[in-house]
Amino acid sequence: MKETVRFIGKIIFIFTLFAILFSFAMFQGGFTSWFLFYSFLPIFLYHIGLLFYPIKNWEVTRHLSQHVVRAGDQVSVTIEIDRKIPFPLYYCICEEVFPGSLNKIDNRYEKYNYLEQPNKLHANRSIKKITFPWFKRNIRLTYTIDQIPRGEHQLQAVRIRTGDVFGMIKKEHYFPISTELVAYPDERPVMLKDKISSYEQGSISSYTMNLKNTNVASGIREYMPGDRFSWIDWKQTAKKNDVMTKEFEQEKSTDTLIILDSCFYESLNPLAFEASVEIGMSLIETIRKQASQVGFLSIGQEITSFPVQHDPTKKEWIRKHLTRLYPTKTQSFSIKLKEEMLKIANEYFIIVITTRMDEQLKETLQQINVRKKRLSLIYIQSKNRITEQDQRMLKQLDQEGVGINILTEKELVNNPIGVNGL
């Protein structure tokens, strides 16, 4: 309705100007008056043509250089406009209508310098390109979207505006063009100083990078090709008059289950949650490269589980899940964690990643530690947001044998990230 009223108003305005000039030429007479009238006539005809020129019939398409990227990457976007009637246009402004999910920036690990003030990473993206097409049938505009945040983003519309030189007539139209852009979580290199492993004859976790422990000898045997020179037992060799080597207690890789807290709470730090997603994804890849089986469990309003088993497609499914994962309101994380742990019978090495510490969670972790004996906690939060009560609870858990990792701005801006106690 508004567009119709506006259109009628513009027609009345143009014809009013034409009528005024014609009346002036008729009543005034003379060369000057008619010169002004005929000089205005081409402008009048152009404005009438522009008023009825249908820009909504343009064919507008959007092309992305990549549809799937990692958080922090950039993509090149090309807008192509095809118009059948080459009506002369002085200017054309093309504006991308960005979704709210793109109104923040991700500059990789540098963003964690703002872990205490995550709002500083919010940005109202605005891309406007101007061109002067005149009689061109095809218009091509290119721009770049950089520092793309994690998530699934839908570019839904392009707004095009044009008008005359004098600004008397302006035309605008929204072109609904849906294009999906997916930004996977950024995978950071994680430096595990200790590999997750356990001895077959005990429940105590051992942290070593070797596939065979060379400190605990369980017996001796005859030398075999491939044995190290340092493994030779010289005393037994002298007694038996044959080369004897030490036999070491074999280790087996520990199946690992990573649990991510995706529950929403009032004081949630959104940037700390982004860090927990990145650390979770990065740990999966790091542990997998160490030839260990790893599973993943995210606890929020919905509980999503990826079992600890060898599946080549599992990592891709986890990556897609973490791409669209955001905190959701539900029961407290500690309650749901306790419920889920009761369903797990296997002796997994448990890694819990969270951004919040409270008394209930501490008690739940203590219970898990008593049952499992193999538990590690990664607590991610800004240094200034960690209270004395949080530090007291974390210290108590550490004294009871839970592996504690506190990741603040200081650790998160490093590349690679150093994680201890796993």
Image: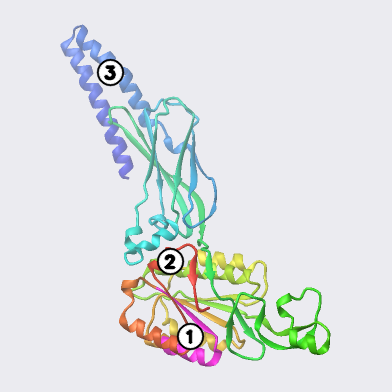
Disc 3 versus disc 1: nearer the observer = 1
Q: Amino acid at mark 1?
A: Val
**Element carrying mark 3:** helix
Q: Residue at x 25, y 22 (%)?
A: 18
Give the residue type at disc 3: Phe
In the rendered image, which residue does mark 1 sit on?
402
Q: CA distance from mark 3 to mark 2?
A: 67 Å
Indicate whether residue 377 is drawn in magenta. Answer: yes
Label disc, if present, on residue 412 of the rendered structure: 2
Query: Residue shown at 46%/70% (left/top)?
Result: 276
Q: Residue at x 35, y 57 (%)?
A: 122
- Eyeballing the image, is 6 above or below 342? above
Task: Work out whether 96 lies above or below 109.
Answer: above
Characterize the local packing of mark 2: few (<14), some (14-19) or many (20 or more) Cα atoms within 10 angstroms: many
Q: Is residue 330 visible?
A: yes
- Which element is circle 1 on? loop
Q: Which residues are magenta?
A: 362-380
> Quick one: 187 or 43, which is closer to the camera?
187
Alpha carbon distance from label 3 to label 1: 85 Å
For residue 153, above or below residue 338: above
Which residue is labeled 3 in the image? 40
For mark 2, give the secondary structure. helix
**Residue 195: percent from the left, percent from the top?**
59, 76
Which three-letter amino acid code belongs to the residue tagged 2? Leu
